[in-house]
Image (tube, rainbow, N blue to C red):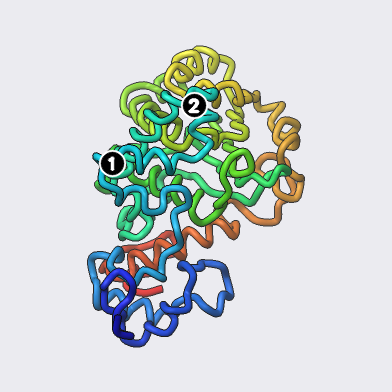
Amino acid sequence: MSAAEDTTGQPAVDGAESKVQNLDGLNLDEQNPDELNPDEVQNLVERYPDDATKWPKGVWPPIGVFEGVEDIDPADTAAIIVRMPAMFLAAEKGNKEKAEKRWLATIAWRREHDMKNILRRPHPKFWTIKKHFPHWFHFSSLEKYPIYVERSSKIDLKALKEEGVTQEDLLYHYRFVTEFLWVYIDKRLPPDGRGVTILDIEGMGMRDVGGEVLDFIKKASKFSGDHYPERCGHMYIINAPWYFKTIWAMCKTFVDPVTVAKTHICKSGDVKKELLMQLDPSVLPKLYGGECPEELGDSAEERKLKRLVRKLNAGLKGIKDQEGDSGSGL
């Protein structure tokens, strides 16, 4: 193999070759000396303007237990099953037949949605979705689980529609951030690799959980429960109104039973006390009575996510992020 080629057979890009050959995954940590600089990224963008999946292989981190499985011949189920991680067996309470069936279904789902490349392709609607759908990764819990906070009642579906965002775009985004969580933020497998989810539903009315919202919740809950089993450490539904029991009775029918068992529903007066069971005061957002100096959206995890998206969107013109930066550079 010549020096101008990587292991995939794709030609290396001038100006980035030496970095790529010595890079063990695209490290998005701040002040990382091995990270490709903006000029090197621009070289890659110019060579492959519409498909970052063709960037040299060393640019991308491995995708954990799924690495290479989607490339196995779908007819060779034995070769796929031998790669099944223990979390699928745990999710099926030790039932090997059910676990294998679920694992095969997961790999088929990943192929259908090209999940091996989802963190390698441009995400042009990322900033629009983030603007109208407030959700963030926010440090780690006392058990070292990554924390995800979503202000579910503040999603502006009307504004999203007006800016051309469809339900499928939202589902794509949800798949994107879910995969990002387990590839870039926490690479551990369960029981260590689990997460804490905080859903803030302050002000949510009965009408807010009907129609398209309910359909989105169903679909997002299904794929995360089916294909990322045993990942829930704790879920907190906070600022729940008095009538939420009726809403929850409807929603929990399509939420994974294991997740339902780990769900804590908190009234507004109990939020701080309940969250401090899992979050240190220095991590709990001030919005919820904590002492965290960082606002939601300013965590190291969020900055890492934004750096990845800027790299992926570097070849797109006219893409504006939340800070008003152009998508044509970093």
Residue at the location (60% across, 57% down)? 299
Q: Foreground: 130 or 98?
A: 98
318 horizontally vs 300: left or right: left
Residue at the location (45% across, 31% down)? 225
User: Is residue 232 placed above or below 12 in the rendered structure?
Assistant: above
Can residue 128 be seen here? Answer: no
Residue at the location (53% across, 25% down)? 94
SS at mark 1 in the image: loop
Residue 236, horizontal then vertical, whole percent: 61, 31
Q: Quadrant of the C terminus?
A: bottom left
SS at mark 2 in the image: loop
Query: In the image, what residue type sits under mark 1?
Result: Asp
Q: Quadrant of the N terminus?
A: bottom left
Residue at the location (33% across, 78% down)? 42
Asked where in the image residue 209 lies, by quadrant, the reply is top left
- The answer to the question of whether label 2 and label 1 lie on touching residues, with beta carbons closer than 8 A, is no
Badge 2 or badge 1: first in the primary sequence: 1
Query: In the image, what residue type sits under mark 2?
Result: Met
Asked where in the image residue 327 lies, by quadrant, the reply is bottom left
- Please tell me how crowded label 1 is: few (under 14), some (14-19), or many (20+) other residues with Cα within 10 Å: few
Residue 130, horizontal then vertical, whole percent: 42, 50
From the viewer's perspective, is the residue at label 2 or at label 1 nearer?
1
Asked where in the image residue 237 lies, by quadrant, the reply is top right
User: Is residue 186 placed above or below 326 in the rendered structure?
Assistant: above
Q: Determine which residue is flagged by label 2.
A: 204
Residue 18, horizontal then vertical, whole percent: 42, 85
Q: Foreground: 39 or 145?
A: 145
